[in-house]
Image (tube, rainbow, N blue to C red):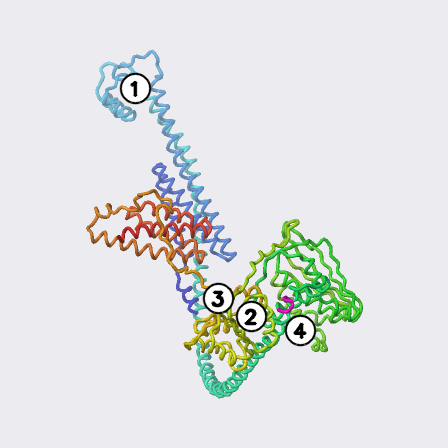
Amino acid sequence: MVHTLEKSAEPNYNLLILKEVTFFINEMERTIDIYRNDLTPVYLRTFNDALEETHYLIDSLKNQTPSQESLELYDSLSYNIKEWAKIQTKMANVNSDLLGSTLEELTQKIQNLSNNPSQPNAQITPDADTLSAEEKKNGFFKRLFGRKNKVNEEALVPDSVDQGPTQSELLQREILAELEAAKTQSLKKNSELRFEIHQLEQEAAVYQEQIVALIEQLETIEIENSNENVRSVEALAKSTNQEIVVFSALSSALLLITIISQLNYIARNRKYQRALSNAKVHAEELASTKEKFLANMSHEIRTPMNAIAGFTNQLLKTDMTAKQRDQLEVVKNSSDHLIHLLNDILDLSKLQANKVKLEEEIFDIKSVLFESMRIFEDKAEAKGIALKTEFETVPRYVTGDPHRLRQMMTNLISNAIKYTDHGSVTLHAKVERKDNNQMTMRIAVKDTGNGIPKAKQKRIFEEFEQAHTADQQQGTGLGLAITNMLVRLHKGSILIDSEENKGTEMTLLIPYKLGRKNQKPEKEPKAPKIELSNLHILIADDEPFNLKLLEAVFSSHDVSLVLAHDGSQAYEQLANQHFDLAILDVKMPGLSGFEIVEKIRNEKGPNQSAPFIALTATISDQEKLQSKNSGFNSIMRKPFDEQELLATIKDVTQKKPDTSSKPKEPNASQLGLAAGEVLFDLSTLKSIGDKDFVDEMIHTFKQSANTSLKNLRKAVKLQIRNGISDEAHKMLPPARHLSAKTLVTAIEKLQNMANTASFEQISNQIDRVESIYTLIKKDLDA
């Protein structure tokens, strides 16, 4: 309603424009009337300008009028004004022709009579031929009528002798005769032209009447539109009043209902809050139970895995047959894969949050696929299933994550064997697409097993979802869910083609970078062999085979070991004798590793400053923080890597050189400055003000430079190029005030580099700016 009222309150601009059209039509009529009496071109130009403005206003009205009737009226008005203007122009031209032609013809005839008298032999008197300057000045007609007066005067004087008409009298008679004839002709022509003007005036009057009628009709339409708008506003106001009354009544009823509902809601809310509070307590208990279960399960699984992986590595160091070594390699690969798989299963939320990072390394893809099949040879043989591999144009080396590929293939092959009772499982691989060094591998695992119902083919990729209810006894239902997550992480896709009782084919489309021809995986540089000597080490673990594994690891080193089977024994040993190192399991009966270290660090015993290494089945952020707070020097997860453990022991038992000394201050030669180069000049500042002014400017320079350098470092860290350019720009004026030309040049270069150079180059230039500033500041401080 407010919008409608505001719109109705606006003036009717169409009526105002129609008034302007009427004004310009009147202006055209006025100027053409003046032009008829005074043939000055300016009036005709004014007439044409008014005509053009009239047509412009009518066109603007047509653009704002949606009504077809109004458009037709505006077209008629435009046409009538145009025709009326043509008639007015013709009338002005007729008047001009009437006056101009009559005078020109009369003047020409009189001049002919003057130059060619009717009696060529007659004597021309001096009075007739010789004119004074005054007479010439008066003009032809004055001279003519002046002579006529003279003749009349002479006629009044009696002439004693009749000498006949003179030459002047003859000329006068001929002129009068020509004047009479010209008068007659002019009257005739004037009558014709005036008749034409009369007809044009009648036509103009008709058009003028039509113009007035059209304008009145259009004004009537606009007035009616305004009245209709007013009537609609009145109706709206009336209906709005009714709606307000209804709304007020409904609002009152609604308010009453709301109060009643709120009272009921408050009562129910209290009931729900009590239920929610109980549910929260229950959920917290479940979460705590789940956390404890995962921690305990992780510890229980990793503990035997630590022994398997550790003793496998120890066995690989011994002499054995090729077949034994080959079998042991399979065990090692399987244990390594199990560790990777265990990490992902226990940290499923990490996969769900896409926090798993893919490695980028060159690996033999055929070897990984073969190894994935070899793991299941015994299981397939026990079921009487044939394992087949089919490779088509598969490159040997690619760049990607071999562990994740092995994990995905293990899940698919394991499922295929699990649900196949007879027939075969085939691993097929080929290059699907190739573009320069990028390619997409198509890896399919096809079995002749039970197949998957169509209704469940989409659901099997969900967590804890399995194709058949009976399958719950055969696994957790996480394999395909994890595989699907890993495929998405590779930005690939997984396809399924299955039919019940005929088999299933799972296909992975995974992009990899193609290795260069004959390119082999880069071998990690062989770490130097670490030899430990003259160390007295305490090892504490409640699992006997973990102690045996550590004994095997240290058997080739010159160390003495003391073993403790629980936390109490470990604390007793540490409280009574000095050790160069203590390796403690964090979860032990009696005292945990965290409690032992915290007590030893707080007591003035022989091992208060000794290094401690924690061994744990899981390393969570909480355990990392707890190990640091309790006093551990390092924390390692089981199963551990032997070389990593030895390197950590070497690191914590040897004193590092003191590297905390401050770096040397930059000097001029290091910055490429000439010897004795003046880095700044205060003479300009001294010429401007006194010592206090100079000191204030130096203080401003230091403060501004320090702030800008900090901001520059932040801008580089956040990679904000505009910030780098702005801060460099801020540093320039104070540097110029000190006439620090070298610093100004370095800052200008930094400003130019802000939008184009790499951030490493920009950081190097900031280092140079800061070094030059440091030298200047040192001299200023001195």
Local secondary structure at mark 1: helix
Q: Position of residue 610 (x, y in %)?
A: 46, 71
Q: Over which residues does the magenta segment extend?
A: 310-314
Q: Nearer the viewer, mark 4 or mark 2?
A: 2
Q: Which mark is residue 653?
A: 3
Q: Which residue is mark 1?
A: 169
Assess whether mark 4 and mark 1 are in contact (beta carbons under 8 angstroms).
Answer: no
Q: Residues within 10 Å of mark 2 (few under 14, many from 20)?
A: some
Q: Which residue is mark 4?
A: 477
Local secondary structure at mark 2: strand
Q: Is residue 734 above or below residue 547?
A: above
Q: Nearer the viewer, mark 1 or mark 2?
A: 2
Local secondary structure at mark 4: loop
Residue flagged by tag 1: what amino acid is it? Answer: Glu
What secondary structure characterizes most of the magenta part?
helix
Residue flagged by tag 3: what amino acid is it? Answer: Thr
Q: Looking at the image, can residue 261 be seen?
A: yes
Q: Nearer the viewer, mark 2 or mark 3?
A: 3
Using the numbered discs, state the Cα–Cα distance from disc 1 to disc 2 in whole angstroms. 149 Å
Q: Nearer the viewer, mark 3 or mark 4?
A: 3
